[in-house]
Structure formats: structure tokens, C-alpha cells
Amino acid sequence: MENKKTPLSFNVIYWIMNVILVLSGFVALGLIVLYVMLWTDFFGNDLQLHMNLPGKVNYLQCGSMSMMGTDIKVELVEASARIHFFNTPSFLARHFVSILMGVVALGLFMMWTFRQFIVNVRKGLIFTISNIILLQRISYSLVAFWIIMIVYTRSAFYYISERVQIDNIEIVDDFDNHIGILLTALFIWVLSHIFMRGLKLQQEQDLTV
């Protein structure tokens, strides 16, 4: 029986996933260390926390743009921004780091699951029940990640917008719905059913031989 050579693309993806998993593991370890340090009040009042501001901001101050000898009145609206907490209290930092740890843990699970799928394909095991389960796990994990992002952005927005007041800035509830994540989950779920169909056809072929 002739052994089929593994395509170069799968070998490249396999090693890239290994590198990403190792780097992500270091990130997760760093977050755990940071979380422990926050509980021991290691930073005191010197912690400077930066995070993406949920929603958008409107700058309530007009400017002008010169074009072809004409001054045009302009203003910046629906702009993305990052928020900087000076001397961040430990309880606030622990809250955001714990959420980030959960997101990283879910990301590690998805990457490890995808790596297992690539390992099976490299071995020539394509239409198997194991691959179907792995694809479905990735799909469900992406849906869970999408739900977490939606809940987090909404809750963080209302938590921050009710308490933050900055001159000439208006925080507006213009959110990114992360539709790309949901569409990716749907595509992988459909792909798992294609593999399921392929497994049935392979089993029927084996019975007729």
C-alpha cells in the first residue's frame, strides 16, 4: 500500500500551531503570575492599566480642514479609543485580568483542539468521528467566545460610561458585533457535517468492498 506524503501546507500549519501554543502558554503563565501579584498588592498604587474602550467616542469639539481655498468645518465622531486608568486600584485590575484569563484559557482550548485536528490529518485520518468531534468543539467554543465578547463589551461599556466624565468627549454605544467570529463558527459547524457525510460514504464503500 502506497503511503501518501503529507502536504507541505499541513506541516507548516502544524509547526505554526506549536509555536503559537507555546507563546500562548507563556502569556497564560504571565497572566497567572500577574493575578497573584495583584492579590498580594505587589504594585501598590503604581499600576497603570490600559484597555480598549468599549463602544465609540464623539469628540464634541469642531475643527476645520482646508481644501482648494475653502475651510470646511469638521468633527471626529464614532472614533475608537483606549482608556488609561492612572494608579489603577487592585480590585479593578483583578476584575479585568480575571476576564482576560478566561478568554486566554478558551483560546488555548480552541488552538489545542485545532492542533489535534491537524495531527489527525497529517496521519491520514481524515473522515473520522474524532475529527468530527474536534470540529464541533471548535465551533461551539467560537460561539461561546462570541457570546463572551458581546456580554463583556456591553457590560464594560455601561460600567465605564456611567462613571467616566471627560471634557469634550461623549461615549456612545456603537459596538462591534464580531459577526466574523459567528460566521467562522457556522462555517466550521457546516464543515463538521461535511466530514460526517464523508465518514458515512467511506463506511458504505468499505462494506461494499
Image (tube, grey):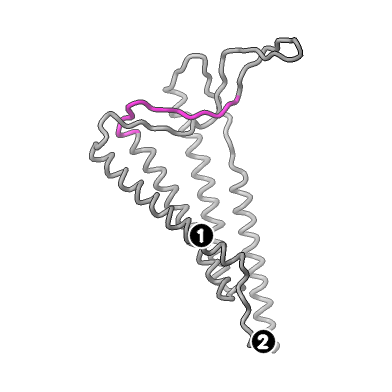
Horizontal and vertical percent for residue 20? 48, 56
Q: Position of residue 117 (x, y in %)?
A: 54, 66
Farthest residue, direction right:
68
The quarter of the image holding the N terminus is bottom right
In this rendering, the answer to whether 152 lies above or below 202 is above
Q: Residue at x 54, y 46 (%)?
A: 146
Secondary structure category for the residue under label 2: helix
Residue 205 falls in image quadrant: bottom right
Of the residues under marks 1 and 2, which one precedes in the sequence? 1
Judge by depth and name the residue closer to the eye, 117 or 99. Answer: 117
Q: Determine whether 6 is above or below 87 in the image.
A: below
- Residue at the (34%, 33%) spot, across then down: 92
Q: Is residue 36 magenta?
A: no
Quadrant where the C terminus sits is bottom right
Where residue 168 sits: x, y (%)?
Answer: 52, 14
Q: For mark 1, what is the residue?
A: 17
Q: Residues within 10 Å of mark 1 (few under 14, many from 20)?
A: some
Counting labels gives 2
What amino acid type should be assigned to the residue bearing mark 1? Answer: Met
Q: Rounded to the nearest whole Å, what is the CA distance between mark 1 and mark 2? A: 37 Å
Tell me, yes or no, whether the highlighted magenta stretch contains residue 90: yes
Q: Residues within 10 Å of mark 2 (few under 14, many from 20)?
A: few
The dot on residue 207 is 2
Residue 88 as seen in the image, left or right of residue 104: left
Q: Say which amino acid is labelled 2.
A: Leu
Vertically, is 101 above or below 129? above
Q: Secondary structure at mark 1?
A: helix
Left or right placement of residue 158 versus residue 127 in this view: left
Q: What is the quadrant of residue 196 in the picture?
A: bottom right
Magenta segment, which residues? 78-92
